[in-house]
Amino acid sequence: MRGGQVDQQRYDIAIIGSGIGGSILATILSKEGVRVVVIEESQHPKFAIGESMILESSEIFRQLAETYDIPEIAYYSSENFKSLVGSAHGIKRHFSYMYHKKDQEENPGELMMANIPKEPYGHEMHIYRQDCDYFYCALAIKYGATVIQNSKIQDLEIDHSGVELKLANGKTIHSSYVVDASGFRSILANKYKLRKYDLETHSRAIFTHAVNVPSFHKVANTQEEYGIPYSLHEGTLHHVFEGGWLWIIPFDNHKDTTNHLCSIGLLLDPRVYPERSELSAEEEFFEFILKFPGINKQLKNCKSVRDWTRTGRIQYSTKKVIGERFCLLGHAAGFIDPLFSKGLYITLTSIHTLAPQIIKSVKENNFETARYQNYEDTVFRFIEANDKLIARAYKSFTDFRVWRKFVVLWVLGAYLEYLKLTLLRFKAHYSDNKRDMYSYYSEIDLRLVGGGFEKFNELEKKVYEILDSINFEDTQDVEEKSQHIFSILLKSAWIPFAIRRYFVENHLNSNQFNLAFLKNKGGILGTTEYRRHFFGELPTLWLLREFFYEKYRYSAANLKKKKFNAYEKFDRFVHIGETV
Ligand SMILES: Cc1cc2nc3c(=O)[nH]c(=O)nc-3n(C[C@H](O)[C@H](O)[C@H](O)COP(=O)(O)OP(=O)(O)OC[C@H]3O[C@@H](n4cnc5c(N)ncnc54)[C@H](O)[C@@H]3O)c2cc1C
C-alpha cells in the first residue's frame, strides 16, 4: 500500500491490533520481507496500560533488536535511550514494596527495595505507553507494514486455504495466516470460545493517570531514615496489604520530565473486597484507601486526569493459542495480574518464539498448526508460572514475615532469568552469529523465572509447598513456616552473593563494578552447577570484555549520537475511509 490506498492483494500475514505486541511483530516480519497488514480499531496515540519495565523485558528488547537488526526495537530498554524516545517517560531505579495493615500507620521496617542494576545498560523506564505504542506502530510502517487505523475487525472466516477478515465497513482483507493481537477482547478467543478462567489468582483492578501524587517520602519517612539507596519516587512503589496491592508509577521523576502524570492502580482480591457497584470507580478508590492511613496520606489529594477504569476479575487464559491458520498473541492469549510486571516480558518472549516460525511458514508456504506447537507450549508455560507466582504472592501478603521471604524468592527468580537471557545473547556474540540466538534460547526450557536452572525450580517448589501449608490464623505456624522458608534459602549455597544480602537487608547491593565479582570463589560466576548452567564455556576475560563493550554500546552518550526518525514514512498510515 502506498499513498493512502490499500492494495487489492492477499497479504501473507494479517495482524489484528496495533498494540505493542501486534506492532513489534509486524515490524520484524516486514523487515524480513513478509507482506503484513495490521488492522487497528482505534487510532494512535491512545491510552494503554503496562508501564513498568523489568530487566527481562528490556533484555528481550535488546535481543530482538540484534537478531533482526532493528535497533529501534531496543529504544525502551533503559533510561539511556531518553534522548531518543523523549522526556515523557519516567525512570525506574527500583521496585519497592511498602507493607500496610488495616487502620494502622505503616512500619518503616517493613519496606523492601529491589534496586535495579545500573550496569551495564542503565536503569529501567516507566513507559508512557501512548507514546511508546505510537512509536512501535510507526516503526512497523517504516519497515513496510500496511497499517489501517479506525478499522474494527467484525468477524473472520478461516479455512484450509486462507483467512478472510471482515471490516466494520463491509470490506474484506485476505491473508494466508492471522495473528490475533487484539488484547483481552480477542475476536478469535470469542469466536472459538477459547477463554478459560481456571486460574489460581483472583484480582480486579481500578486504575487511572493522576496529578498531585507526592513522593512517599514527603508524607512518610525520608530516604535516609529508610536506609535505601534511591528515593522511592525514582522507581515503582507498591503498597501491599492483605487482599491486594496498589502501584505508584510516576513519570515526573527526573529532571528533564515533560510529563507530570503518575499512573496509579489498585488490585483487589474480589473474594476479600467484592466490587462496590453502588459507588463509581473513583468513589470506591478513595473510600478504599481510607482503610490504610499510609496509602491514604499519599493519595488522598490526587486528581485523575482521565476516567477511572474499573475491571471485573482480570485473569483469563485460553484453551489453545494456535489453530488452523491462526494464533493468539500477548493479551489476546491470557493475562494474570500486573504485580511483578511480567506482562511485557511474556508478550515479547511470545514474539521471539513466534516470529521465526511465521517467517519459515511464509517462505515454505506451509502453515500447519503443528509447526506452532513450541509457541503454544511457551505461552502456556509462562501464563501458568505467572499465575502460580502471583497467587502465592497474594497469599504471602497476609503476614509481613512471610511476604519478606517471598520477596527474596521473587528477586532470585527474576535475577536468574535475566542473567540467563543476557548470557544467551552473549553466547551468540561469542559465536559471532547473532541469528543463532534463537537456537540458544531453545537450549533451555524458559518458564518465566529462574533461567531454566533446575536447582531454582526445586527451591521454588519447596517454598510454594510450605506457603500452601501455612495456617495464617495461627501466628505460631506463620512464624515457624516463615523461618523454615528462610532456612531453605540460607542453605541454598548456590544463591549468588548479590542476592544473599537481601536475606538480611531491606535492599540489594548497588552494583558498582568490582573485579572481586570475577574471582573463582564467591564471585558472580558462582561455582559448580550454577556456574556451568549460567556461564558454561564462556571465558571469564571474554565476559569482562563483553561487559565493557555493552556498557559503551548502550551508554547514553553513544546512543545520543544516533539520528533516528521512526515517523519518516508516516504518510503510509491508512484510515479506513481511505481504503479502496
Ligand atoms: C492493569 C494492567 C497493568 C499492567 N501493567 C503492566 C506492567 O506494569 N508491566 C508490564 O510489563 N505489563 C503490564 N501489563 C501487561 C501489558 O499491558 C501487556 O503485556 C501488553 O499491553 C499487551 O499488549 P498487546 O499488544 O497484546 O495488547 P493491547 O495493548 O491490549 O493491544 C490490543 C490492540 O488491539 C486493538 N483491537 C481490539 N479489538 C480489535 C478489533 N476487533 N479489530 C481491530 N483492532 C482491535 C485495540 O484497540 C488495541 O490497540 C498490564 C496489564 C494490565 C491489564
Image: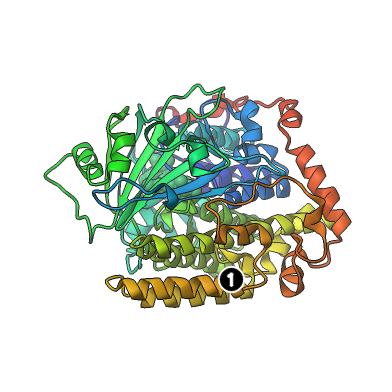
Q: Give the residue displayed 64% in from the left and 67% down from the top.
A: 495
Q: Quadrant of residue 399?
A: bottom left
Q: Residue 317, how many percent across, how many down?
A: 39, 63
Percent position (x, y) of residue 464? 45, 73
Rendered residue at 72%/46% (across/down): 66
Looking at the picture, which amino acid does disc 1 mark?
Leu
Q: Disc 1 designates what residue?
A: 490
Relative placement, left or right, of 309 versus 34 is left
Mark 1 burial class by Cα count in 10 Å: few <14, some 14-19, many 20+: few
Q: Is residue 14 above or below residue 142?
A: below
Q: Report whether 475 appears left or right of 447.
A: left
Q: Is residue 128 visible?
A: yes
| Closer to the camera in the image, 258 or 12 | 258
Q: Where residue 212 appears, x then y in whole percent?
A: 35, 26
| Residue 25 in picture, x, y percent from top left | 57, 47
Q: Residue furthest front?
A: 225
Quadrant including the N terminus: top right
**Label 1 residue SS:** helix
Q: Nearer the viewer, residue 554 or 361?
A: 554
Answer above or below: position of 218 versus 101.
Answer: above
How was this image coloured?
Answer: rainbow
The quadrant of the image that shows the C terminus is top left
Name the residue at 60% across, 35% down. 139
Query: Residue 468's image quarter?
Result: bottom left
